[in-house]
Image (cartoon, grey):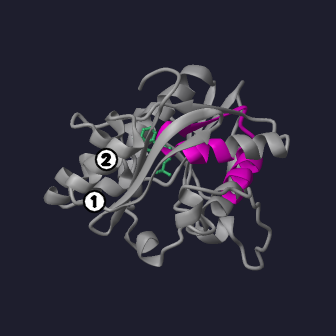
């Protein structure tokens, strides 16, 4: 797969027909591949970004422990038909003197537990959109609040990009695929399975009981309106790894 390190290299990449962008933080798994495939099916040129965005981490330990394996990621991207992988340095995205931020004014759920998270997400997404100038950008339903924030960013700032959301990809045991799953010890992974079990109840009170039964003390178990869809959302720490997952309560069942 072609790898671009700089904004200039992305801008110099030949653009053929429609362009799809898939933003990722790497440690690619089948959830990311589902986004690549959705982009591949709809766009002539597929560009993926691989950037562990420090601005969206609210804990230094989480950022430091974030899994990174660019060689493996490049192979996954190539196999999925990605045309260009944009893997910039932190300095390329946040050069000295950087001080302009997009504040989406998001409240609730992740915004309460990760101060500054959505400011980091909105800022890097806007920057990626202006660098890549995609016609379509693909995001996972697994981060449903992120999808809602990005859709509002696009609406509020009249950005010329269409946002597509892709259903959550799960392991056979029901656990939503996440780059952070690799940090779970076997007994933690067994405990984490209470999260999809809790979501399957489709009821916040029942969900809380299922998590409590498994010994998990969640950050939140809430039904929130995300993009007009009532969504049961859970965040819980399993050991030192914080996991999030959700299920839309209306619309197509996952
Ligand atoms: P990340 O690399 O974790 O920032 O994720 C990059 C994109 O992949 C985001 O839009 C995520 O919502 C999406 N994604 C992550 N995990 C999954 C999954 N299990 N199923 C579908 N999309 C996912």
Q: Name the residue at 77% across, 48% down.
A: 130
What is the CA distance from the residue labelled 1 to the residue labelled 2? 9 Å
x, y percent for residue 3 = 54, 50
Secondary structure type for disc 1 = loop
Q: Name the residue at 64% across, 42% down.
A: 148
Q: Is mark 1 within 8 Å of ligand 1?
A: no
Q: Is residue 128 magenta?
A: yes
User: Which of the numbered marks, if any, corresponds to residue 249?
Assistant: none
Secondary structure type for disc 2 = helix
x, y percent for residue 14 = 70, 36
Q: What residue does disc 1 label? A: 216
Left/right of residue 132 with respect to residue 247 in the rendered view: right
x, y percent for residue 147 = 60, 42
Q: What residue does disc 2 label? A: 195
**Earlier residue among tags 1 and 2:** 2
Picture quadrant of residue 214: bottom left
Q: Which residues are magenta?
A: 123-149
């Amino acid at each position: 797969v072609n790898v671009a390190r700089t904004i200039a290299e992305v801008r110099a990449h030949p653009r053929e027909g429609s362009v799809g962008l898939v933003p990722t933080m790497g440690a690619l798994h089948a959830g990311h591949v589902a986004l690549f495939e959705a982009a591949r099916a709809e766009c002539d040129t597929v560009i993926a970004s691989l950037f562990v965005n420090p601005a969206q981490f609210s804990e230094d330990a989480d950022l430091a422990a974030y899994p990174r394996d660019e060689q493996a990621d490049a192979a996954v991207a190539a196999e999925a038909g990605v045309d260009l992988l944009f893997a910039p340095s932190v300095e390329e995205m946040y050069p000295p003197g950087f001080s302009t931020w997009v504040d989406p004014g998001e409240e609730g759920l992740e915004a309460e537990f990760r101060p500054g998270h959505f400011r980091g997400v909105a800022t890097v997404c806007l920057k990626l959109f202006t660098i890549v100038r995609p016609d379509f950008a693909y995001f996972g339903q697994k981060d449903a609040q992120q999808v809602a924030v990005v859709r509002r960013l696009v609406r509020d700032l009249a950005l010329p990009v269409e946002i597509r959301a892709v259903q959550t990809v799960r392991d056979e045991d029901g656990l939503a695929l996440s780059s952070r799953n690799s940090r779970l010890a076997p007994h933690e992974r067994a405990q984490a399975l209470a999260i999809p079990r809790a979501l399957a109840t489709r009821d916040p009170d029942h969900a809380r009981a299922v998590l409590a039964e498994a010994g998990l003390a969640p950050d939140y178990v809430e039904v929130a309106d995300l993009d007009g869809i009532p969504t049961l959302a859970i965040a819980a720490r399993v050991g030192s790894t914080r996991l999030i997952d959700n299920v839309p309560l209306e619309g197509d069942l996952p």
